[in-house]
Structure formats: structure tokens, C-alpha cells
Image (cartoon, rainbow, N blue to C red):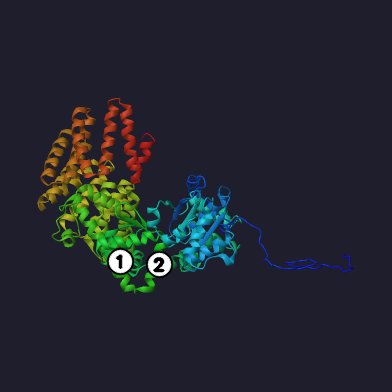
């Protein structure tokens, strides 16, 4: 109370209150927000798994003292849906304590900010009043750099589409860390020292763990088989797995098998709508020609492919297609591998095919697929001829495809080509069978036999052989049917399924075919008899096959059947006659330039000498056979040589060498899927 009896009462709430007896000037100030450390990075997904190595890689880059300069920039790349955003947010959360000056965040891409807009918002987060934020981009950037000098900030930049977006928001401190998530390879950023960090789809156990966290009611563990199939159908992509898991979580009565069925069928796009939305966004940004190549990728039937087959499909020069594929790799839609090869994730391929359906007719798509099949058939035919020569029996005339093309490919290069393309050829056969292009199915199988015989991937051999036999029957080509049944029988023989081999050969011999094919059915029948120890029957079939080849003047066939006659004689204990016959076979094979037959004749000669404990002679013939096998890159022959060397070493009591050769042979047979591997590893 004042001396004059006047008094003031303050009650209620006011933002600004000034009380004085005499008032000169009054200044009202805006309410002040307490200073705070910016923490702008959104939280990552509640269910986050794996990426331990990625976190360790980023952690190893931090630790510099706060000085002006360029911060560490980590460019996180990977295909859409692989979890780049989740990773950078998780890293920012885990490493927050190492950056006491705070965490900044900006997002670009569709619906995102411009660099100028992002700078304005970040300046406010750093404490600059609204009225003091510059209106133009350059002054905003200058102020941002001044404020971030000597700071320890972590900055997350998401959905980056251009290196300039990153440059605009770089803090001005060498102690800062900038995490960039992008679907695009930012070459300019890497040129300035950005550290690349590639994110791949999850491993199977991590994918299951993520599904288990999203759908946490125990269904994943109760039906482990369906869960594993579910995450595989999701391509082990975190975005797809979360979408599928969320669908399960809100439908507690569903069995996992129901969602698996949806993902296999027409509902897959609806279930994975979020993933396809991401792909749609990336696809929309592609230049027209790159988009056309992307649509063509959906029609390729294998996951791994070379630039040449894409060029054949789209009808563009290889060099130009390589540049377009580089653009798709930069957009993380394809993965670039060695030797001009690329790979496409299954979900990306499904999206590419969906886009192709929207832009082309079924006839257009079939035409493009036929171009790819023709490329594989031409390549397989060329590799087949390069590996085994033109004289080998074939139902489909290679000259019809190759014409006057002069082949410069070596046998080694031919088998290397098959190593790269055989899975695509098998996939092409399945696609052709579905389309009803049955003649192409058996032609592809026949052209790939050189690979099957040399490498012997038995499971694939049986699968494609069965498909080829079925297609040859539908196609009505009796000669093709006889040939494919014989080649399939050989696969069954290697698997020691002698009953199935005999069944195929009985059907092949019953078909009305010409003399040369009839001799071939005798050849395969004799080999089965040889394998089962019926040497007298084997001699009968081989002798008839040789007589037909002699009458037809077939030099290679005569050499081969002479070799087999020698094997039957050796089995009957007629050693002298066998050695003489092997020498004749080797001579005939050299004249016919049938190098694999020469190697087999030398190997069987060595085997006879080894049995007789004539080790010097055995070693001599073995060395010559091994040299030819290496030149031909013939895996099956090399395995047989290892087995014979093991047997020879055993007779010499050199048990260490014998075991080493047995292990080497077992490794080869294991890759083939042959039951011989288990027996060798068990000491049999």
C-alpha cells in the first residue's frame, strides 16, 4: 500500500506485466521458448532387427574434435523397401549421446522439402527466431554454416535424389555426422569423400525375427515352415515383412498359410501395396528409355542376367543398354555385379512385370520373351558346339541356328558361359513349357547337354530333362523324344536310380528312329549295363552301336563305342583285349578330334594298369588324361581322375594322398548332387 492510500492488486494470468508508480517507456517482449537441443529425427520402427555391422561401420567413423570443416558423410544405398530409412533413424538414435549438439532431419523426394525450406526449418530448430530467418536460400545457407561451426551434430537426410540437396545441408564441422538415405547412386557425393554403406535384404533368421516382432502372438513360431515361406515371398525386405506382419497382427484368427496363399496369388499387390508404391515412385522418375528397359526386365525369367540378353530383348546396342542399366542400378532397381551382369530382386521383377502389363499387350510381351529365348538358344548351341564339336549327335541341326558363324570360343570358355547362364536356360525352358512353345523346350535341353555331362548338376538335369521329354511328346517329334529320354536316363544313372534309367531307355529303344539315333539308344543302354555290372550285356549293346557307327562312317561315334567295348572287355576280365581296344579308341578319337573321348580312353587304360599294380604305366596315362581334362575344364572327368589316383595311392600305402584325392572327388560329387559324395565322405 502506498503512502497516499492507493494500492494495486495483481490477479489472474498475463504474459507480460509491468507495475510502476511512474511509467516512462514500456516494451512488450514475445513469450520465450526455453533453449533446447534439437532432436528432429523421427523414431525408427518399433520392430528393428539386425544391421549390427552397419552400425559398427558408422560408429568407427566418428570421434573427431569439433573443428570447422566437412563432416563425415555416410551414403546409405539399397533397393526400395530394404530399410534404409529405418537404418539411418536407428543409427541416429543409438549414437545420440555422441552428438551432444543435437540431431537434425530433412526429407526430400516426392512430397518432401526443398533445400531452402529445409534450411529455414533447421535454422529455427537451432534457435533462430522466425523473424530472423533469411528469406533467400544463400543467406539461409550462410547462417546455417555459421551456426553449425564447431558443433557435434548428427544430420539425417532421407529420400535424397540429388547430391546438391546434401551439400546445401552439410553442417560446417568435421565432428558432425551426416547420414544420407537414397535410392540413387550419388556419384558427386562419393567424389567428395562420402562413405558408401550398402543395405541388403535381411538374412532368413533376421527376417523371421522381424515378422515375429510385428506379429507377436506366437503364430510365427507355431508354423515355422509357413513363416519362412512368407518372409521369402516378401523378398526378406523389411518394408514388405512389416506390411505382411501388420496384416496378420490385425487378423488374429488367420493362419500364416492364408497370407502365404494371398502372396502367391492375385492379392499379392494389395498385400504389398506399400512396397509397390515405393517402386512406383522410383519408376516414375526414370527417363523413358530406362523405363523401357526396366519393363523388359520383368519378362526375363532369371534373377541374374547379362547386358547382352537385355540388348537382344529391347533391340538396342549393347553399349547403350549398359548405360541404361547403369541408370537402373543408380536407382537401386537392379544390382550391378561383375562381368557386365546384373541381378533383380524378385519383388522388383514383379513390379516391372506389372508395369509392363500396363504398357504393352500380351503379344508384345511374348515377342520380347521369344527374343530372350532365341538369345539363350543361340548361345547354348554355340557353347555346345565349342565344347564338344559339330560331330556329336544332335537332333536339332546346330548349323540351322549358327549358319556360317565362325566360333572362336574355347571349350573352357563355353563351359564358363554355361556356368553363368544354365539357371536362366532352365528358367527359359519352364517359361516356354507354360507358353506351349514345346519345340524350344527340348532344343534348349539338348543344347545344354554338354554342360550337364561336364558339370553334372543332377537335380537340375533331371528337372529339365523331364520337362524336355514331356515337351518332345507334346511336340510330336519322335527323334527328339528318343534323344531326350536317353539324356534323362543318363542323369538317373548318375543318381543310381537304375530302374528309372532303364524305363526311359526301354521307351527310347521302342521308338521308330533312324540308325544313328538307334545306335545312341544302344550306347546308353550299354552304359547302364556297364554301371550295374552286367558286362556281357554291355558288350552286346556296345558292339551293335559300334557296328552302326562304322556303317554310317561316324568317326567320333565309332571311337566312343570302341572305348565302351573296351570297358566291357575289362569288366569281363579280358585285360589284353581291353588295352588293345582302348589304344584303338584313343587313336580313332584323336583323328576325329574328339578330345573328351581321348581323355576317357587314357583314363580307362590307366585304371586297368592300376588294377594290375603297374603304377608307372598308370601314372603316365593318368597324367595325360588329367592334362586334357583341365584343358576341357571337364569337372566330371577330373572327379574320376581323383578317384583313380586315390585307388592308386592306396595300393602304394600312401594313405595321406589317397585321402586327399578322395576328399577332392567327394567335393566335386557333392556339388553335382551325386550319391557318390556321401559314400566317399563316409570312407566307402
The answer to whether residue 414 is visible is yes
Relative horizontal placement of residue 367, taking residue 142 as reference (left or right): left
Q: Which of 165 and 554 is in front in this view?
A: 165
Q: Nearer the viewer, residue 10 or 330?
A: 10
Q: Which of 450 and 376 is in front in this view?
A: 376
Q: Mark 1 points at which residue?
A: 369
Residue 325, percent from left and from top = 33, 61
Can you tell which quarter of the image residue 643 is in? top left
Residue 478, percent from left and from top = 23, 62
Q: Which label lies toward us, 2 or 1?
A: 2
Residue 182, percent from left and from top = 44, 59
Relative horizontal placement of residue 594, taking residue 498 as reference (left or right): left
Find numbered disc 2 in the image and state the secondary structure of the residue it sits on: helix
Report the Cα–Cα distance between label 2 and label 1: 21 Å
The answer to whether residue 224 is visible is no
Residue 371, percent from left and from top = 27, 66
Q: Mark 2 points at which residue?
A: 283
10 Å neighbourhood of mark 2: few (<14), some, or many (≥20)?
many
Find numbered disc 1 in the image and state the secondary structure of the residue it sits on: helix
Relative horizontal placement of residue 217, taking residue 322 as reference (left or right): right
10 Å neighbourhood of mark 1: few (<14), some, or many (≥20)?
many
Amino acid at each position: 500500500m502506498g503512502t497516499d492510500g492507493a494500492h494495486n492488486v495483481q490477479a489472474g494470468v498475463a504474459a507480460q506485466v509491468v507495475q510502476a508508480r511512474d511509467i516512462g517507456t514500456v516494451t512488450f517482449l514475445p513469450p520465450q521458448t526455453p533453449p533446447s537441443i534439437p532432436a528432429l529425427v523421427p523414431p525408427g520402427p518399433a520392430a528393428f532387427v539386425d544391421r549390427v555391422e552397419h552400425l559398427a561401420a558408422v560408429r568407427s567413423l566418428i570421434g573427431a574434435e569439433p573443428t570447422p570443416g566437412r563432416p563425415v558423410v555416410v551414403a546409405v544405398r539399397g533397393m526400395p523397401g530394404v530399410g534404409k530409412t529405418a537404418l539411418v533413424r536407428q543409427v541416429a538414435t543409438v549414437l545420440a549421446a555422441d552428438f551432444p549438439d543435437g540431431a537434425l532431419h530433412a526429407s526430400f523426394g516426392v512430397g518432401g522439402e526443398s533445400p531452402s525450406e529445409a534450411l529455414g526449418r533447421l535454422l529455427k530448430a537451432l534457435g533462430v527466431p522466425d523473424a530472423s530467418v533469411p528469406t533467400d536460400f544463400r543467406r539461409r545457407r550462410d547462417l546455417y554454416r555459421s551456426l553449425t561451426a564447431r558443433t557435434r551434430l548428427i544430420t539425417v537426410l532421407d529420400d535424397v535424389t540429388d547430391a546438391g540437396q546434401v551439400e546445401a545441408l552439410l553442417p560446417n564441422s568435421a565432428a558432425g555426422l551426416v547420414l544420407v538415405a537414397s535410392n540413387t547412386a550419388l556419384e558427386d557425393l562419393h567424389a567428395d569423400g562420402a562413405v558408401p554403406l550398402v543395405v541388403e535384404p535381411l538374412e532368413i533368421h533376421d527376417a523371421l525375427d522381424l515378422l515375429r516382432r510385428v506379429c507377436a502372438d506366437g503364430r510365427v513360431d507355431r508354423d515355422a515352415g509357413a513363416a519362412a515361406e512368407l518372409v521369402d515371398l516378401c523378398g526378406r525386405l523389411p518394408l514388405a515383412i512389416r506390411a505382411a506382419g501388420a496384416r496378420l497382427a490385425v487378423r488374429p484368427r488367420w493362419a500364416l498359410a492364408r497370407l502365404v496363399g494371398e502372396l502367391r496369388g492375385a492379392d499379392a499387390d494389395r498385400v504389398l501395396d506399400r512396397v509397390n508404391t515405393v517402386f512406383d515412385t522410383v519408376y516414375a522418375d526414370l527417363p523413358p528409355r530406362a523405363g523401357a528397359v526396366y519393363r523388359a526386365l520383368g519378362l526375363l525369367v532369371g534373377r541374374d542376367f547379362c547386358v547382352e540378353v537385355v540388348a537382344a530383348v529391347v533391340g538396342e546396342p549393347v553399349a547403350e543398354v549398359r548405360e541404361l542399366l547403369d541408370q537402373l542400378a543408380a536407382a537401386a532397381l537392379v544390382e550391378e555385379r561383375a562381368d557386365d551382369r546384373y541381378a533383380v530382386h524378385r519383388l522388383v521383377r514383379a513390379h516391372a512385370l506389372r508395369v509392363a502389363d500396363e504398357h504393352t499387350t500380351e503379344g508384345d510381351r511374348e515377342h520380347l520373351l521369344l527374343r530372350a529365348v532365341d538369345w539363350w538358344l543361340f548361345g547354348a548351341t554355340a557353347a555346345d558346339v565349342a565344347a564338344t564339336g559339330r560331330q556329336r549327335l544332335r537332333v536339332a541341326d546346330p548349323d540351322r541356328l549358327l549358319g556360317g558363324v565362325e566360333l572362336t570360343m574355347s571349350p573352357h570358355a563355353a563351359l564358363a558361359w554355361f556356368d553363368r547362364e544354365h539357371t536362366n536356360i532352365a528358367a527359359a525352358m519352364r517359361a516356354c513349357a507354360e507358353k506351349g512353345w514345346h519345340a524350344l523346350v527340348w532344343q534348349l535341353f539338348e543344347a545344354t547337354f554338354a554342360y550337364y555331362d561336364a558339370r553334372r548338376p543332377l537335380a537340375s538335369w533331371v528337372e529339365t530333362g523331364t520337362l524336355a521329354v514331356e515337351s518332345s511328346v507334346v511336340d510330336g517329334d519322335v527323334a527328339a523324344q528318343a534323344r531326350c529320354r536317353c539324356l534323362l536316363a543318363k542323369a538317373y544313372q548318375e543318381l543310381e536310380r537304375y530302374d528309372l534309367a532303364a524305363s526311359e531307355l526301354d521307351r527310347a529303344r521302342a521308338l521308330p528312329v533312324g540308325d544313328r539315333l538307334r545306335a545312341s539308344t544302344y550306347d546308353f543302354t550299354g552304359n547302364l549295363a556297364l554301371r550295374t555290372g552286367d558286362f556281357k550285356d554291355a558288350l552286346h549293346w556296345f558292339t551293335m552301336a559300334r557296328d552302326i557307327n562304322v556303317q554310317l562312317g561316324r568317326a567320333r561315334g565309332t571311337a566312343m563305342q570302341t572305348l565302351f567295348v573296351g570297358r566291357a572287355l575289362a569288366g569281363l576280365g579280358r585285360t589284353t583285349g581291353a588295352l588293345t581296344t582302348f589304344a584303338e579308341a584313343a587313336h580313332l578319337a584323336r583323328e576325329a578330334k574328339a578330345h573328351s573321348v581321348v581323355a576317357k580312353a587314357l583314363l580307362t587304360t590307366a585304371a586297368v594298369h592300376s588294377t594290375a599294380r603297374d603304377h608307372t604305366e598308370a601314372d603316365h596315362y593318368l597324367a595325360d588324361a588329367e592334362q586334357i581334362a583341365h584343358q576341357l575344364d571337364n569337372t566330371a572327368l577330373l572327379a574320376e581322375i581323383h578317384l583313380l589316383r586315390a585307388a592308386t595311392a592306396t595300393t602304394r600305402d600312401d594313405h595321406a594322398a589317397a585321402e586327399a584325392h578322395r576328399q577332392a572327388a567327394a567335393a566335386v560329387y557333392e556339388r553335382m548332387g551325386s550319391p557318390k559324395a556321401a559314400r566317399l565322405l563316409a570312407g566307402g
